[in-house]
Amino acid sequence: MKKTGVAAAVFGIICNFGLFLAKLYVSISSSSLAIYCDAVNNFLDVFSCLLALLTFALIARLAERKSLRAQSLCAFVINLVIACTGVYFLYNGLQRTLRPLPISYTYKYAAIIGASILAKALMALIYNLLNKSAQSDILRALVLDSVLDCGVTAFTLIGLVVAPKIGFAADGIFALVLGGIITAQAVKEIIKETKFLINE
């Protein structure tokens, strides 16, 4: 499990940092809040993968019971980070709705964001395949995060295309919806991990 987990975490760190840079470029160039929030989400995913890396590195030194607890605790923290990201989206979405800004759209930006969706889908697939052999709460959390990110980024892509056509405040509304979806799913997972930790 340790080697599989470490490989998955390193893979996640590299991919998420690359996605962060790409989305940051698009968000700054287009003035899109939704894409900026998505970029921040990927940056926080880097830290989630770093935490996963540290946890997997420690698992080999722990007994099985403590190993399961360590994985659950790591998954709890990862989902807590995801929930904080969702709240951040909600806050910024409200701010942008109250103070709208113009958004620039180009096919190049759309292509970059579209490619990032495919990258996250591939990450989810790889994490899922690794989880079938390792069976880890951490890997399951990373699978969930990647799947959520696919939906979130697809939604931001729609926002990037639609917002300039229907009004500037649409970008803020998209960020609010994204924040609500992410926060709700993360809270659900936090409750699940909390129950496991308490029962242990």
Image: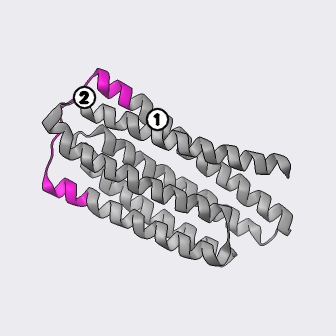
Residue closest to the far top: 98
Asked which secondary structure carries label 1, the reply is: helix
Distance CA(mark 1)–CA(mark 2): 17 Å
Q: Is residue 50 above or below residue 29?
A: below
Q: Main secondary structure of the magenta part?
A: helix
Label 2 environment density (alpha carbons within 10 Å; few <14, some 14–19, many ≥20): many
Give how far across and how far down residue 131 sits, in percent: 61, 72
Q: How many marks?
A: 2
Magenta segment range? 93-112
| Residue 88 badge | 1
Percent across and percent down for residue 143 are 53, 62
The answer, for residue 80, to whether it is visible in the render is: no
The numbered mark, 1 or 2, whose residue comes first in the sequence reads 1
Spot occupied by residue 108 in the image (x, y as percentages of width and height): 16, 57
Q: Quadrant of the N terminus?
A: bottom right
Amino acid tagged 1 = Tyr
Element at label 2? loop
Q: Which residue is mark 2?
A: 169
What percent of the width, then of the height, locates residue 168? 20, 30
